[in-house]
Image: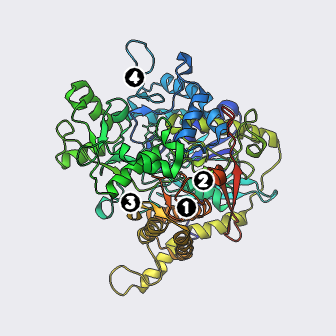
């Protein structure tokens, strides 16, 4: 331990994670906080980090208010419908009213936008999506953040938040380690914006063994966005609302451009339109929600799952018609080359030419996110002018810990933000964080050396476990006294898969399964005290796993609490198979006591701010 160098940095605003929300936050913090010290710390390298790393073909959230295409109210209605009624409308509206300005910045900064030749407007892919050549998207927003920050730290994984010792319930910064040098980094900060993405690989993926890592969601998104605040007692919301996606099989290539722009459609193994077959059955589960337009994402998944269970698979995307048009064929391929090159490679390796053969689709394993067609995450204050009292406690996007803010996948209740909305939410959070810091005036944050030294011991313990434990190995590589990150990860995925509604049980769970699953997750977390890491890279894997495990327990607790099946197609509570608006037209909240590790659950009211309907 004495060999590990400690590097300290004191700042006003610390941004954890330099993805879409983190770059937005860093950029905006400088705009409002000209003289403040702003630091962004990123696990990878912000030029190519986060879910957008490879590039995107569409910006999925743009109102187009300048051309009267959509208004923020329309987006609230859309997100509310897709999430089966349950969203924080104050947060959604707030994001939507500002998102266009972010997109205009991207345009100004040189992002190649496609234009409609007749109107000159941005080329629409769908009602909310506009098409871009997105390979340069991440480097462009990274440049804005680099020009704004006092310092960007790459290759540092943040493992814990620091708490102020002079005042209860107030954040004081964060600590982590550099995966290349091994240095221990202490960031004391007056305000922290957590923007660390969502959580993949908490449920067992479809691709295992040599294919592991091939998931829809970025494999490096490890739930730090949730684990960091959960660990210090911040409230979380809607963590049961995991997302499951219909995507091209094995490469997880996106289907949005295919459905919306190429006008392709799905068919079962016999070439039949299977979705309508499941209409009556779905209506019995969710009532009139099945008649909504567009059909909520989870309900379309539901028809897919039921059809495959009934023997109607494989499900295909009918591409052969659209691909006869050479322009659409080009768009279809470009769509992958711009953001999911792997799908094109999978098709090439499996002899699939979508011009002559309709490719297979799959339903993914579940992921936890706050910015896609799902809204798990931290419970944050909304904006002053919109939020009812239960949703407002002072600073926009501040969690229930003073000075701790969130944006993008971190924030719960506000679905369908995507890349542009997450960047925008980062900007909103940073603007409020600047105000918070300025309001503190010269009040000091106290984080003493003891807190930092204790965390240092904890962080590097897996290296120690390995160094000591490997001497006990008499043959092979399995130690009697430590487990490796990959072993712990696979155990976590198995528990989540079998007990919390993963792929091998067709997304089904119930009270008994969840209670047992939570017991097993607790035992796993105890055992993770004995995780061993042979180098700094494995140390990162160890901490990624610990964050995943904590996030998973929170997901399981929420799933146990909500006694209904609100989103069939995302997961099913077998003991409460129907949507129950009388009892569960509400948001779920959890808080984990940092001292005891015990979760407490409660309901929060759901307010319909747009249209004021219940
Ligand atoms: C497969 C896929 C396809 C998508 N397609 C589209 C699309 O076509 N159009 C669109 O508009 N949106 C799309 N999205 C959505 C968009 O990518 C996300 O909404 C957006 O990236 C979320 O922003 P974020 O900042 O919350 O997370 P991210 O952009 O993922 O950033 C999180 C950052 O935090 C860092 N980090 C994580 N843990 C730590 C830690 N412990 N310490 C330090 N740093 C950490 C990560 O390295 C990463 O850089 C897609 C998302 C996915 C997963």
Dots 2, 1 in contact, CB < 8 A: yes
Front in this rendered view, residue 566 or 158 = 566
Q: Secondary structure at mark 1?
A: loop
| Nearest to N terminus: mark 4 or mark 3 | 4
Q: Residues within 10 Å of mark 3 (few under 14, many from 20)?
A: many
Q: Percent x, y for residue 420?
A: 52, 34
Q: Is residue 163 visible?
A: yes
| For discs 4 and 2, the disc positioned in front in the rendered view | 2
Please, what secondary structure does the residue beneath circle 3 have?
loop
Mark 1: few, some, or many residues within 10 Å (few <14, many ≥20)?
some
Q: Which residue is mark 2?
A: 580
Q: Residue at x 61, y 34 (%)?
A: 95
Residue 114, which numbered label?
Answer: 4
**Other-residue count near label 4 (Cα within 10 Å), few / some / many at <14 / 14–19 / ≥20:** some
Q: Closer to the camera, 288 or 109?
A: 288
Q: Badge 3 is on which residue?
A: 205
Residue 576 disc label: 1
- Does label 3 or label 2 sit earlier along the sequence? 3
Give x and y (percent) for residue 132.
Answer: 40, 28
In the image, taking residue 434 as reference, residue 335 lies left or right, namely left
Q: Is mark 4 within 8 Å of ligand 1?
A: no
Q: Which of the numbered marks, if any, corresponds to residue 125?
A: none
Which image quadrant is residue 119 in?
top left
Whole-percent x, y for residue 143 in the image = 50, 34
Residue that sits furthest to the top in the current view: 118
> For the residues carrying marks 3 and 1, which lies nearer the camera in this image?
1
């Amino acid at each position: 331990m004495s060999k590990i160098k400690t590097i300290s940095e004191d700042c006003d605003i610390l941004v954890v994670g330099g993805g879409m929300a983190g770059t937005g936050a860093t950029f905006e913090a400088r705009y409002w906080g000209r003289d403040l010290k702003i630091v962004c710390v990123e696990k990878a390298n912000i030029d190519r980090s986060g879910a957008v790393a490879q590039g995107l073909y569409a910006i999925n959230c743009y109102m187009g208010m300048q051309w009267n295409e959509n208004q923020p109210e329309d987006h609230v209605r859309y997100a509310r419908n897709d999430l089966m009624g349950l969203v924080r409308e104050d947060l959604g509206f707030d994001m939507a009213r500002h998102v266009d300005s972010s997109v205009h910045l991207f345009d100004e900064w040189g992002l190649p936008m496609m234009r409609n030749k007749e109107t000159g407007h941005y080329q629409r892919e769908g009602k909310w999506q506009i098409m871009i050549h997105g390979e340069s998207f991440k480097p462009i927003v990274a440049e804005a953040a680099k020009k704004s920050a006092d310092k960007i730290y790459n290759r540092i994984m943040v493992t814990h938040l620091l708490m102020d010792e002079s005042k209860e319930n107030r954040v004081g910064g964060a600590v982590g380690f550099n995966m290349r040098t091994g240095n221990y980094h202490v960031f004391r900060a007056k305000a922290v914006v957590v923007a660390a993405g969502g959580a993949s690989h908490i449920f067992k993926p479809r691709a295992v063994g040599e294919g592991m890592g091939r998931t829809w969601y970025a494999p490096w998104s490890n739930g730090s966005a949730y684990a960091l605040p959960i660990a210090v007692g911040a409230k979380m919301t809607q963590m049961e609302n995991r997302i499951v996606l219909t995507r091209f099989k094995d490469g997880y290539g996106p289907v949005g451009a295919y459905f919306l722009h190429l006008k392709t459609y799905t068919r079962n193994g016999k070439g039949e339109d299977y979705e309508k077959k499941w209409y009556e059955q779905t209506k019995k589960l969710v009532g009139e929600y099945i008649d909504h337009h567009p059909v909520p994402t989870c309900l379309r998944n539901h028809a897919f799952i039921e059809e495959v269970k009934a023997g109607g698979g494989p499900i295909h995307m009918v591409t052969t018609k659209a691909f006869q048009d050479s322009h659409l064929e080009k768009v279809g391929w470009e769509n992958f080359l711009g953001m999911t090159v792997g799908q094109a490679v999978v098709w090439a390796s499996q002899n699939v030419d979508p011009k002559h053969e309709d490719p297979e689709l799959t339903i993914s394993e579940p992921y936890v996110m706050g910015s896609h067609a799902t809204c798990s995450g931290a419970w944050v204050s909304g904006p002053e002018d919109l939020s009812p009292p239960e949703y407002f406690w002072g600073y926009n996007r501040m969690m229930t810990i003073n000075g701790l803010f969130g944006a993008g996948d971190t924030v719960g209740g506000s679905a369908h933000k995507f890349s542009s909305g997450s960047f925008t939410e980062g900007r909103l959070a940073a603007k409020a964080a600047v105000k918070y810091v300025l309001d503190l005036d010269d009040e000091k944050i106290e984080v003493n050396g003891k807190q930092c030294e204790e965390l240092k011991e904890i962080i590097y313990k897996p290296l120690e476990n390995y160094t000591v434990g490997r001497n006990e190995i008499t043959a092979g590589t399995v130690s009697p006294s430590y487990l490796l990150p990959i072993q712990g990860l696979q155990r976590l995925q198995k528990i989540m898969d079998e007990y919390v509604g993963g792929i091998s049980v067709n997304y089904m769970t119930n009270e008994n399964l969840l209670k047992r699953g939570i017991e097993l997750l607790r035992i796993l977390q105890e055992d993770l005290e004995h995780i061993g890491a042979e180098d700094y890279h494995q140390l990162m894997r160890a901490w990624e796993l610990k964050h995943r495990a904590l996030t998973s327990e929170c997901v399981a607790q929420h799933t146990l609490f909500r006694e209904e099946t609100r989103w069939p197609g995302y997961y099913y509570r077998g003991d409460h198979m129907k949507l129950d608006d009388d009892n569960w037209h509400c948001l779920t909240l959890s808080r984990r006591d940092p001292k005891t590790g015990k979760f407490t659950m409660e309901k929060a009211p759901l307010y319909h701010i747009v249209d004021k309907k219940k």
